[in-house]
Structures are given as structure tokens and as C-alpha cells.
Amino acid sequence: MDRKTVGVLGEVSAAKFYRDAGYTLLASNYRTRQGEIDLIVQGQSVLVFAEVKTRAEGSLLTPREAVTPAKQRRIVSTAAAYLEKFGSDNQPVRFDVIEVYYNDTGMTRLNCIEHAFEA
């Protein structure tokens, strides 16, 4: 599989994970001048901005290591733009990193890191 396909499959798996946990998907691949957020989901009392990183099993770096401080700043800035446009009703927000691992047969596991970083 090419990188783009792998990334899309990772995002689909992450969206399913949130749906199964009772969250509502509000947006995927939300883009502004500041950057992009892979998934924006609504929980009962929290709005979650999630970065999805997909890697092959056995990769040298973990997916979470790819979410550098610079990437985190872009996500936070993009989240601020989203909140300015759509509001949040003053509910708490959370920044998650979803690690998706795969091998030749498909996705092998998914790890959600809640509160992976702060605004």
C-alpha cells in the first residue's frame, strides 16, 4: 500500500474507534491557513482534536514521536481557528494522538493517547 492509502485507512480506523466509544464525528481533515486537524469529534462533555499517525509495525519511531512540538503548535492554532468559527459552548477541549499500527495484512492495533499535549 502507498503512504496516502495507509494514512486514509488509519484515519478511518481512528474515526471508527471514536464512534464506537460514543463520540460524534464533526469534521475530518479540517484545514485552515494554520494547518490541518485529522479528526474533530464531540464527546458528552469534551471536544476532541485528534492527530492520527499510522506506522508499520516495527518502525523505528512510534507514531506519537511524529507529532513534534511544531506540529502541536499548528494543531493548536488550527483548533483555535475552528473554535472561533464554530464556537465550543465553553466546553473543555482535548488534544489526542491516535497511533495506528499496520502490517501486510492490515491494521494490527490502535492506541489512543488522550491529553497527548496541551494548548
Image (cartoon, grey):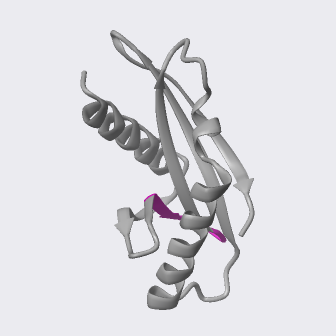
Which range of residues does the magenta coloring cover? 38-46
Res 43 visible? no
Total labels: the figure holds 0
Q: Splitting the image into 4 quarters, where does residue 8 fall? A: top left
- Looking at the image, which is closer to me, 23 or 49? 49
Residue pictured at 56% horizontal, 42% vertical: 98
Horizontal side of 78 relative to 62 (left or right) equals left
Image quarter where the C terminus lies is bottom right
Looking at the image, is 32 positioned above or below residue 89? Answer: above
Taking the magenta stretch, the answer to whether it contains residue 115 is no
Residue pictured at 49% horizontal, 62% vertical: 41
- Looking at the image, which is closer to me, 23 or 58? 58
| Coordinates of residue 28 in the picture (x, y in percent) | 36, 60
Looking at the image, is 116 positioned above or below residue 41? Answer: above
Horizontal side of 99 relative to 1 (left or right) equals right
Residue pictured at 49% horizontal, 82% vertical: 81
Res 93 visible? yes
| Coordinates of residue 39 in the picture (x, y in percent) | 44, 57
| Coordinates of residue 51 in the picture (x, y in percent) | 52, 51
Image quarter where the N terminus lies is top left
Looking at the image, is 23 positioned above or below residue 6? Answer: below
Q: Residue furthest front?
A: 70
| Coordinates of residue 27 in the picture (x, y in percent) | 37, 66
